[in-house]
Amino acid sequence: MLTPPPSPGVQTDSITAKQRTGRRIRWTVVLVPLALILITSSTRYLTHFEISSLHKRADFATLPSSAMSTVPTPTQTDPPTRQTVPAVPTSPTLPAPFPQPFDSSLSQNFSSLSCFNFFQNMTSAAPFRSCRAFSLLLQSSNSFVAAQSDLNRLNAVVWGTCNTEPTNDVCAANMAWFSAKLASACATDLKDRNSLAVDTQTALDAFDVMRSAGCLIDPTTNSYCYLNAVHNSNPSDAFFYSLPLGIRVPNNTIASCSPCTKSLMSLYYTAMGNSSTTLASNLGEAYPDAARISVAECGTAYAKLSSAHSGAESLKLHLWTCTLVLIGVVSVMVSLPFFE
């Protein structure tokens, strides 16, 4: 018995169906990977959204003991955590000589002679020394570190940084001048990321905001906030003073939620938007993590999240919205008659 040939109409319908299926598969093969690429790239971008580190700064608190050889050994006292925090003095007797930055010998590791000469001249210049820059003392003064073992001595030192014979405005102008000269004299060293040149420019640019930070007073005790931070057995308060230098607080920091640190965070948030120097970039690098930790421990009213952090959240929402829309468009397109 012979099998009749297939009907032409049936064969045509079968071919058409196969062609439709083939076209759907081809569009799916093209569009679905495109959506997946967008998802992957947006996820990768979001998980790495942070301002990259400009420079890994030296931890001046961990200098070898040989670097402290020029600093007089302070009188042995109880540890700062067991001392009474003194009130802000009126006209204390200042230490003589007053602590200065770079009080150990300057490093010889310069890329250029002009930079070495600049540091030699700056550190001996009266317009520099008389301003007693809190930022540079905190960053690079062994005498300042030694003074922290005696809160009464530290009280006089902090008072001295807040009450200089040149006014704050004059000192701020002096530090800006030194920063500009450093940028010129140490151009090669800055390009080579010489730590001394980079860190010093950072501290010079942070002079004004860190002077304000160091001179903050706790109204409940009439004592300097910085002394309270040194006195506190929880080191977290002290960490926040280094934010303008681009040094982040450790991830395991437990904020004390003190009113002093709240004032610091407000000061820094304002400074980020008012500076075109390295201060803005360094605070932009260090502030977001500190704000996140502060808000998590102390509540949303304690510190403002940085605009960079808020921008990242907005960007995250925008990218994921676009991704979901694209997936929806792909699903609709492959089902339309146009693609069949």
Image (spheres, rainbow, N blue to C red):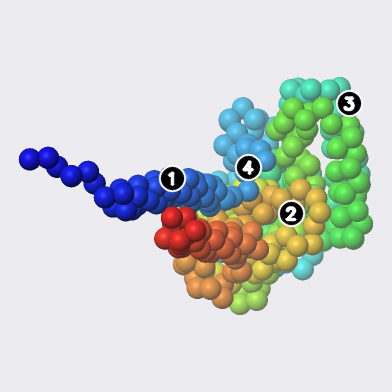
The image quadrant that residue 202 belongs to is: top right
Marks 3/4 in contact by CB < 8 Å: the verdict is no
Estimate the x, y position of residue 194 in percent, counting from the top left.
73, 30
Which label belongs to residue 215? none
Q: Amino acid at mark 3?
A: Ser
Instruction: Please give the residue where the numbered disc 4 appears in the rendered image.
Output: 53
Camera-nearest residue between 177 and 281:
281
**SS category of the residue bearing label 4:** loop
In this rendering, position of residue 66 left or right of residue 117: left
**SS category of the residue bearing label 1:** helix
Quadrant location, the N terminus: top left
Q: How many marks?
A: 4
Quadrant location, the C terminus: bottom left
Q: Amino acid at mark 2?
A: Ala
Q: Residue at x 67, y 54 (%)?
A: 284
Estimate the x, y position of residue 100 in percent, counting from the top left.
77, 43
Q: CA distance from mark 3 to mark 1?
A: 66 Å
Estimate the x, y position of residue 232 in percent, counting from the top left.
52, 60
Camera-nearest residue between 156 and 118:
118
**SS category of the residue bearing label 3:** helix
Instruction: Please give the residue where the numbered disc 2 appears in the rendered image.
Output: 280
Asked if residue 73 can be seen in this view, the reply is no
